[in-house]
Image (spheres, helix red, strand yellow):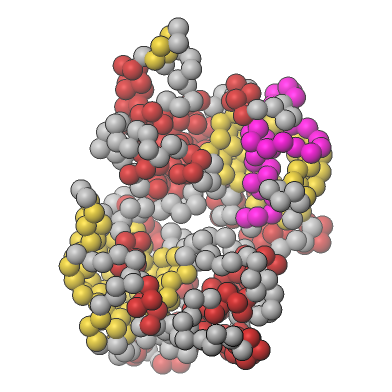
Amino acid sequence: MSDNHAKMKHSIGTSNRWEMYLDNREVILEMRNITKKFPGVTANDDISFSLKKGEVLALLGENGAGKSSLMNVLVGLYRADAGSIYVNGQKVSITSPSVSSSLGIGMIHQEFMLVDTMTVAENIILGIKDLNLVPDMKAISEKISEISEQYQLKVNPSSYIWQLSVGERQRVEILKLIFRGANILILDEPTAVLTPQESKELNGIINQMKKEGKSAIFITHKMDEVMAFSEDVYVLKQGKLVASKRTSDTNPKELARMMVGREVLFQFDKGEYKPGKSVLTVKDLCAVNSKGLEALKTISFEVKSGEIFGIAGVAGNGQQQLIDSVTGLQKIRCGSVYINESDCSNKNPIDYIKAGVSYIPSDRLGMGVAGTMTVLNNLAMKGYRDKPFSSHGLLIKSYFKKFAENMIDLFRISTPGPETIVKFLSGGNIQKAILAREIDSCRNLLVAAYPSRGLDVGATQAVRTRLIEQRDEGKAVLLVSEELDELLMIADRIAVMFEGEFMGIVDSSNTDREELGLMMTGMKRDQVK
């Protein structure tokens, strides 16, 4: 139960009266018997739920469970094959996002829908049809400032989006919906790119909105956020609604079990930390971003065999340039990169592959797989040049199939078969396919960028288990993640990045979320202590 709930419950008096308070609130949204089908797949199967005024409803489910499809029906991106939607007791037909918006429903996606070169105010009014040909930007900015003050969404209306932090950009997205009259907000993984401090701030903002009578549907895979943010939780599995609970009547372990059908571990037993020789050595590394601006500022560190070295930080602080520099995907401006004491600075990606480096990219579909190819061919993508995949320049198809079937079984990839086109798999199973290929080909260093981002608890557990296995087998693992719990759980040492620099390197057994979170905001470790 959240602190806000506890206070309200105390003020009401008894548990029974608290339940009566929850039950007596006005229902403002109902989705009744919603069914949505795609060729060969029923994404939503006769799903019904209701949302009350001033309530946060958490929507849980594995990757591919149907959460996104259901919300896309609600915001008008999809049309349901059956079922009906009621807003404030009236049956409505939501045929487009503009209709959804006119009904007071808005969605904040994981990837923010903002134009970097425009101001906050310009982004907020972008696309509104009933404005004057020449909008009164002064009046608009004043209204935005008024809303900002009311909901504690501190942001300057005249700032350009490119000048804002990730947390500030999220505030702009919330402001945009409130400005347009949204009373029902759909938040899709809203804390995925926030620091712990910004996540707490978001919780405060949501509580303020609830006091104003607004409601939210909260999609997340983080169980602690379900417990902190929501009053009710609905669990989807394979397109069906399998459970609905009052949040105060459940716990993370029960929710995880309902999601994946088995017990899920929230702690991992690692072998003893026994670091060996240095596998990756980075010295005084400098690099620029795609705009030619400095992205890395003389970074130095090493990753040893038998070690998981974690990189923490809000995305956009140089992590991608660091990853690209140690996998051969980007030329470095100064410094050096050594793999097993061999200078690989500015060599091609194929040279890094030959040096035993494997890479799990953050962009699964864009970089991790060839979406239009089969699962079989994607799994063989690293090894096809050599025996036993090929001989004298000829591919041995029978081995391809045998290898793919073994990987599918070993990594529990849910697919109709090896010949399935990989883009039709769920996000979690695409990630498992990438893991299978990269782990099988890894001889020295495994670079994993945000490997559990957007995955459900079951798939996340599988990913983390595999990374620990690599570490315990003596491989070096460079793990880049925004999930502080993940880093504290499985990393041995953690470096925190801010604006292209390391704020400090700490032992995971000698730090906590608060210290890491403060360093993520730009404080050096010696300033935090």
Residue 205: which quarter of the image? Answer: bottom right
Depth check: give the residue in front, 391 or 341: 391
Q: Residue at x 44, y 82 (%)?
A: 182
The percent position of residue 37, horizontal first and vertical second, equals 21, 57
Residue range highlighted in magenta: 315-343
Depth check: give the residue in front, 505 or 529: 505
Q: Quadrant of the N terminus?
A: bottom left
Q: Quadrant of the C terminus?
A: bottom right
Depth check: give the residue in front, 227 or 519: 519
Q: Residue at x 25, y 37 (%)?
A: 416
The percent position of residue 500, horizontal first and vertical second, equals 75, 51
Left or right? Give the position of 489 relative to 33: right
Q: Residue at x 66, y 80 (%)?
A: 157
Number of numbered discs: 0
Residue 286 in view of the camera: yes
Residue 20: which quarter of the image? Answer: bottom left
Residue 4 in view of the camera: no
The percent position of residue 316, horizontal first and vertical second, equals 65, 55
Q: Is residue 325 magenta?
A: yes
Q: Is residue 383 magenta?
A: no
